[in-house]
Structure formats: C-alpha cells, structure tokens
Amino acid sequence: MSRAASEPRPLAAADVERAALTVARAFAWHEPWGAWALPDERTREDRLRGMVANDIRERFLPLGRASTIDGLSVSLWCPPASSPNAAAFGPRRDDDAYELFGDRLEALRAGDELLRTLVPDGDHWYLDTLATEPARMGEGLGGTLLDHDLAQLDAAGETAALDTHTPENVAFYERRGFRVVASSEVPHGGPPLFVMLRTPRRA
C-alpha cells in the first residue's frame, strides 16, 4: 500500500535541497542520460545534486516553474519564448554549466545542439525535469504532479514540450496527450532521444 502524500504545490525555497536530492537520485540511477552524462558512479549523485540545487535556486524558482509533492516528486519547467523571463532564463546550460561535466563537456554540447534542431518552433513551456524519489516510484506521484501542471497549462491555453530517453517514458507522456514529433540518438554513444509536444486540451 502506498504511503499518503500531500497535494501538488509550487516548489518553495525550503524544498530545494530535498527536491535536488530527489532529482539526483532519479537521474543518477534510473535514467540513461545520467549514466551517459556522468559515467563515474562514485560522484554521479552528488554532482547532480549540486547542479540541480543551484539550477532550481537561480533559474527555475525565479524565472520558470517548479512544482512538487513533498519534495518526493519534482517538476521543473523552462519558460516559453514569449515569457518576460525567457531572456534572463537563457539557454538550458551556459558555459559554466558545461564545465561541470568535465570530460563529457563536448559530448553534452553536441547532444544539446542536436536537441535544439529537433524541438519544434513555437511558444511552449518546456518540461526540463520530472523526477520521483526512487523509493516512491510506482505510487503515481509523478503522474499526479504532471497532471496538476498540465491542468494549469490547459487552463491558460498553453502548449508543452519535452524530451525523454526511453520507450516507457514515451508511453507515460503519450497517456497525457503528448506526441512524438522527432526522434534520434544522443551523439557520442548517448541514449535514444524522443522530442514530444502537447497542445492544450479544452475543457
């Protein structure tokens, strides 16, 4: 039986460390991107946790959107081009961020450049991250959180986009109205890459 969890809500500054740990644990051990981008298992989780905490504080909280369920499930959204925050938010990773990936720097740059060519033109909120604490996976937290976020986008008539790396994830997002609009493989031995788009649903 799953344990009770709170309702989805905006992520607050007090949630940052717990949220960053959730994302780090999920992407370090349960997403192929994590193993590809940070191949050293000894440092992977800690490095991701630091990167994510900094990103949430400096970008997603003040300039994008961030939601959570008890810090156990986390969603992070990049603003659309039409948002007044878009210019300040900037590209997903700047030069300082790439440097954190060490030997994987150029491979990550190549992967991000490929992604930029695949993401469709147009105005959309971009789901950068959806992650659930691994010990709580399978309880429906991620789906509940994403449904909450998408309901808000639907109410505002806004489009959503994302990229993901496994057929299982594709099926999860398809059940919520996303469709694959492009696919490839991340260069330099990276995982599959699926770009998905969702137009708002009308009430």
Image: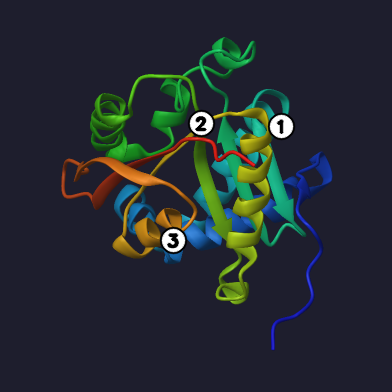
Extreme residue toward the bottom, this view: 1
Above or below 138: residue 72: above
Number of marks in picture: 3
**Sequence-wise, which precedes: disc 1 or disc 2?**
1
Which residue lies at the image location 60% right of the left edge and 29% below the top edge?
157
Tag shown at residue 61: 1
Residue 108's quadrant in the figure? top left
Q: Label 3, secondary structure: give it.
A: helix
In percent of width and height, residue 64 lies at 64, 28
What residue is pinned by disc 3?
Answer: 172
Q: CA distance from mark 2 to mark 3?
A: 18 Å
Quarter of the image that includes the C terminus: top right
Direction from residue 101 to residue 132 in the image, left or right: right
Under mark 3, the amino acid is Phe
Whether residue 43 can be seen here: no
What residue is pinned by disc 2?
Answer: 159
As rendered, which of 132 and 177 lies closer to the eye? 177
